[in-house]
Amino acid sequence: MSTTTNPEMTMTKAGRYGDFGGQYVPETLMPELIRLDNAFQHYQHDADFQAELTDLLNNYANRPSLLSYAKRMSADLGGAQIYFKREDLNHTGAHKINNVLGQALLAKRMGKTRLIAETGAGQHGVATATIAALFGMDCEIYMGKMDTDRQALNVYRMELLGAKVHPVTTGSMVLKDAINAALQAWTQRCDDTAYIMGSATGPHPFPTMVRTFQSVISEEARKQSLELIGHLPDAVVACVGGGSNAIGSFANFIDDPDVQLIGCEAAGKGVTTPLTAATIECGRTGIFHGMKSIFLQDADGQISPVYSISAGLDYPGVGPEHARLAETGRAQYVGVTDDEAVDAFEYLAKTEGIICAIESAHAVAYVQKLAPTMRPDQTIICTLSGRGDKDVAAIAKYRGVTLNED
Amino acid sequence: MKTKLTQAFRNHKALISFVVAGDPDFKQTVDHVVALAEAGCDIVELGIPFSDPVADGPEIQAADLRAFDSKTTPERVFEMVAAIREQTDISLVFLTYANLVYQYGYVAFAKRCAALRVSGLIIPDLPLEEQGELRPALVAQNVALIPLIAPTTTPDRIAAIAKAATGFIYVVSSMGVTGMRQSLTTDLTPLITAIRAETDTPIAIGFGIHTPEQAQKMAEQADGVIVGSAMVHEIASQQDVVAKLTTYTHELRQAVDSVAN
Ligand SMILES: Cc1ncc(COP(=O)(O)O)c(C=O)c1O
């Protein structure tokens, strides 16, 4: 596990990135969060814990993940050399498993017997259900009704793995509402239950914990870049929902000022429309889901319903460390529309033979714009956060193709 | 800090009710609060509806939606309080979520409360650790920040929360979110005793209380009882609400008054 130290980014006080972060939760949860933080602080430096986690990452989740050179795409775009960090090749098909293994192992050490989680695209739910099965723990997943409909395959996957899936019908019935429901469920029952947060969001210690467990992405990528290419990349590009694959991709490069860090948010139908989820571009500072961060909200502070074709990026907030990285200018955040993401999804399939997650396709779309503006001796690492099997039916529908699945 | 709130607990066990401002509309909320005051409530908590009320159960979530349907905003709620103030001087507190207060501006919100004689704020997602950013603005206006203590709160936290408490302390009767509960099993005596050892700030118990019997039981343990979802439930019926709230409050008042102070 990496230990990035950067004076500017070091937390100002417990769980704060600048003024962002904190623990804005009901008192009922505070004692449990404090216990969790203490356990995390302890096991983060515990050799046995680390050894078990590394073993699971390598021998169960299929790490280290490849850093693949995208030869045809680099040639086609005619600029920077493009490399993909292949989180899509992990067991369960996304980066989510890195974090779930870490948090679930911690839960086990804390004596928990039951895991609950929210999920958007279903990838985090699948990863949590998978590890619950592996560890012999009970598992319940909260998922917005909109998302259980558009990601039906992942719902069935979770059920196959023995988890109970609760479709959430409050609010706009997407990821935000699933988090509300999961937080409420945790408030009701936390003695035997761990809440496995799926992104680098929520109250402290979740953003820091998720960052720590996901930073294996950039720990490997940094090493692979030096070995394979001989130098650090010029840019690292990742998609941002709550920001876990992005912060994991950035973490070990934050101290290298020459490495440009770019997060790609879902702009939905466009940042000038209300149908968007581009939080950093369109939002402002607020307090929600346990953290002070940037949120899409109206003038009064009511959280906005958001929209993206991608269930995993359909979130009105962003993790507090991203809010801080945006504020200091250390990272840049750009919006990518549904149309651009779907084009990139198809482009990557045809050019590199990779069907990536629609979330990851947001990062690919920006690489298509960025690479031609760079020199051929420069490199970009783009994180492919997940594989796209789950999205094939939805993309077909977007293109007006009817699939007969009977 | 001695506030009007503390006075509400002086002569008898306090009866505190909760309604969502704007449920189902501006005028009816004003009528409901006036009715509750006349029927014998000591304090009314007015909920300012939030898009994502994570501490609230289905009953109050539904009330928030009804309030949004009648275009309720924080500004409209302040106007409601002004209208309420033309008819009653009852102690009022706001219950809302941190973001609405943050977006209004802590200082501006506190001043608005003081001007309307709103005596306190309950903010479920602002635990002790995060109260520092809001507290100075409230202290300057003599508006109380009413903290919550839960069955899970540890002794060190009880001490720290009790020391910082103003107005009264809201003891959450059971784990989970707001909503009526058939039975309240938690024995709160040890928790209440631990709080009493730290402060003489009044203690009110809430979450789940809806029958007069439950109210009486809780009044035996604490200085006041809070009835929320059950009030909201009456309002949701949309029929003879003022009469129902009046009768219900009389029943609760009687139950609570049967316990000596
Ligand atoms: C494949 C994939 N990528 C990205 C995300 C977005 O999450 P985060 O921003 O935390 O990486 C998700 C979330 O469901 C996902 O499934």
Image (tube, rainbow, N blue to C red):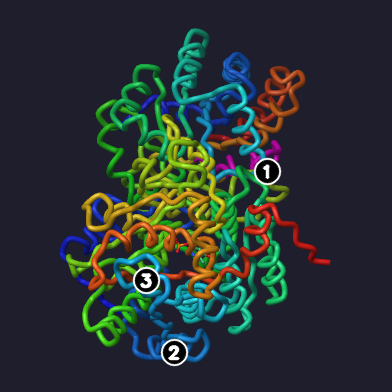
Disc 1 to disc 3, C-alpha distance = 61 Å
Q: In the drawing, what numbered circle is on residue A74?
A: 3
Q: Is residue A199 visible?
A: yes
Q: Could you tell me which residue is drawn at 68 percent across and 43 percent down?
A: B180
- Residue B21, compared with residue A315, is above or below; it is above
- Quadrant for residue A310, please give it: bottom right
Disc 2 to disc 1, C-alpha distance = 45 Å
Closer to the observer: label 2 or label 3? Answer: 3
Amino acid of disc 2: Glu
Q: Could you tell me which residue is drawn at 36 percent across and 78 percent down?
A: A216
Q: In the drawing, what numbered circle is on residue B180?
A: 1
Circle 2 is placed at which residue position? A52
Disc 2, SS: helix
Q: Chain of mark 1?
A: B
Q: Could you tell me which residue is drawn at 34 percent across and 82 percent down?
A: A220
Could you tell which of marks 2 and 3 lies nearer the N-terminus? Answer: 2
Relative to A189, A376 lies left or right: left
Q: Which residues are magenta?
A: B204-220
- Residue A128, compared with residue A309, is above or below; it is below
